[in-house]
Amino acid sequence: MAHTQKDKPRLLARIRRLQGQLEGLHRAIDEGKDCGDVLHTLSAFRGAVNGLMLEVLEGHIRHHIMSDGEFHEPRNSGEGAEELIAVLRKYLR
């Protein structure tokens, strides 16, 4: 089972919170709220997205890099390090 399926309830809860924050951002702009309020909402949304990204990234590292998939066999550290570097490069763009 993929780690995203195992963690599905927690990830979906985070996504629902993101949806609520995005709706709040839409409302704030639509209602002409002060730019400080909009920036505060944007900051909260960015933090929530980063939290979701971190959770999925951590699962990826634990499931696919530190171990070899379902069997949790240790991987070659050089191979795992290269994959981790590639994942971080994509994440930090």
Image (cartoon, rainbow, N blue to C red):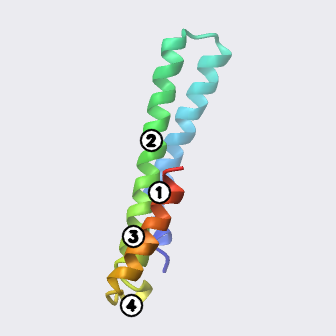
SS label for mark 3: helix
Query: Sequence order check: which comes first, mark 1 or mark 3?
Result: 1
Q: Nearer the viewer, mark 1 or mark 2?
A: 2
User: Where, by quadrant of the figure, is residue 22 drawn?
Assistant: top right
Question: How many angstroms separate mark 1 from mark 2 (CA)?
Answer: 11 Å
Number of the label disc, if any, that sits on residue 61: 3
Question: How many angstroms separate mark 4 from mark 1 (CA)?
Answer: 23 Å
With 78 as the anchor, is 13 left or right in this view? right
Task: Give the labeled residue for mark 1.
Answer: 11
With 1 as the anchor, is 31 left or right in this view? right
In the displayed structure, 67 sits above or below 39; it is below
User: Where, by quadrant of the figure, is residue 78 drawn?
Assistant: bottom left
Query: Residue at (44%, 84%) from the top-left corner?
Result: 69
Query: Sequence order check: which comes first, mark 4 or mark 1?
Result: 1
Question: How many angstroms separate mark 3 from mark 4 (CA)?
Answer: 15 Å
Q: Amino acid at mark 2?
A: Ala
